[in-house]
Image (cartoon, grey):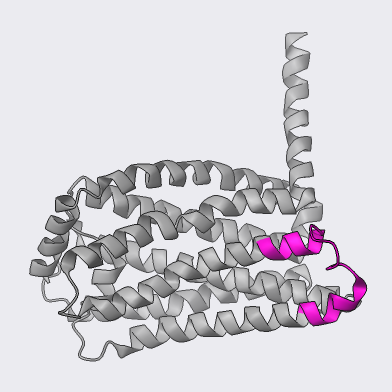
Amino acid sequence: MLDLEKKWFESFHKLHLEFLIIPAVVITLATLLANPVLLTCICLSRALRQETRYLLVANTLMADMLFLIFNLTTMIYNTVRAQIPWRVCELITAVSVIAYCCAILTVTLMVVDTYTAVRWPLQYHDILPPARTRRILVGMWVLAAVYPFIVLILMEIHRSNSHEKVRVCLALISFSFLQIKDTLGIHIFFFVAAIICAIMICYCYVRLYMVTRTQGIWQSRFSRARVTLLAHAVLLLLYFAPGFVFIVELYLFDRKDISQELRVWINTANVCVFMLLPRALAPYLYGMRYREISDTLLILVQRNRRPSQNTVS
């Protein structure tokens, strides 16, 4: 394992991929400034807290923030060539995977929530009241955490050197170097989970179109429904694409006919570009799509301006 970490470490700095790290850090910091603003708007507004869709938005933003913090930590460690204890690396990896999976599950539930609201408008508040939504979100975090922590415990059991330090902290290396004979479960877990979420999303969108196509909301080229669907489709594609790229990375990891430089390129691009794009766009798409959030933000800004104006006068 040390030999492979050394190869990845040398390949990363040999290819001078630091130029991808700098914009990734800037994008991450900008997103970490925008997400708390939207979260504050949702938490301070009682009306928003009582609606299922805003609870789902808040959960997505929280999961994204958690992922970005730990992803930024690993990027900085890998770039400055610092060595960290392997336990810290594995814990960071596990939490990052949990946050990523929870974000995917939440955006999937957002599509199901939209379908439920359109398909059963009168029974919607009875089907998904805020209290039930909160319990579902707690269960979602537990579900997302089960498999990564099982893998973490197994790695703790099978690790020979408990005081070892690593120079490269990557989820790809962590999952691919379990000292267990059968790693097929990791591939099956990610692939099946992604397929189930994708099927649910496709089914809900097809059913939504079939239910609403006779109501005339699709006739205008720039109708709100069409623009909303396009924005959601782009965001969902950006959320799911890095997961499928990671599955491909796991498959290519043990291939001898694939060059080390190519694998390092794919992993760096996935971590620094593809995984950051949806999280960088999400707060702005949510802020523009949900008028209640933007209205609440304007009210908070105006409320904070008044005391300052009174002080000046």
Magenta segment, prevailing SS (helix, strand or loop): helix
Quarter of the image where the C terminus is located: top right
In the depicted structure, whether residue 275 falls above or below residue 69: below
Q: Tally the marks.
A: 0
Q: Can residue 136 be seen in this view?
A: yes
Residue at horizontal 21%, vertical 87%? Answer: 180
In the depicted structure, whether residue 173 falls above or below residue 24: below
In the image, 278: left or right of 220? left
Q: Is residue 103 visible?
A: no
In the image, 302: left or right of 248? right
Which quadrant of the view contains residue 119? bottom right
Compare residues 45 and 217 and report the one nearer the observer.
217
In the depicted structure, whether residue 66 falls above or below residue 191: above
Residue 148 placed where, x, y %? 38, 76
Residue at horizontal 74%, vertical 59%? Answer: 227
Instruction: Give the extent of the magenta segment.
Output: 208-230
Residue furthest to the top in view is 313
Residue 26 placed where, x, y %? 42, 41
Residue at horizontal 74%, vertical 24%? Answer: 305
Residue 137 placed where, x, y %? 62, 71
The reply to whether the magenta stretch includes residue 220 is yes
The reply to whether the magenta stretch includes residue 190 is no
Compare residues 240 and 139 and report the one nearer the observer.
240
Residue at horizontal 23%, vertical 52%? Answer: 78
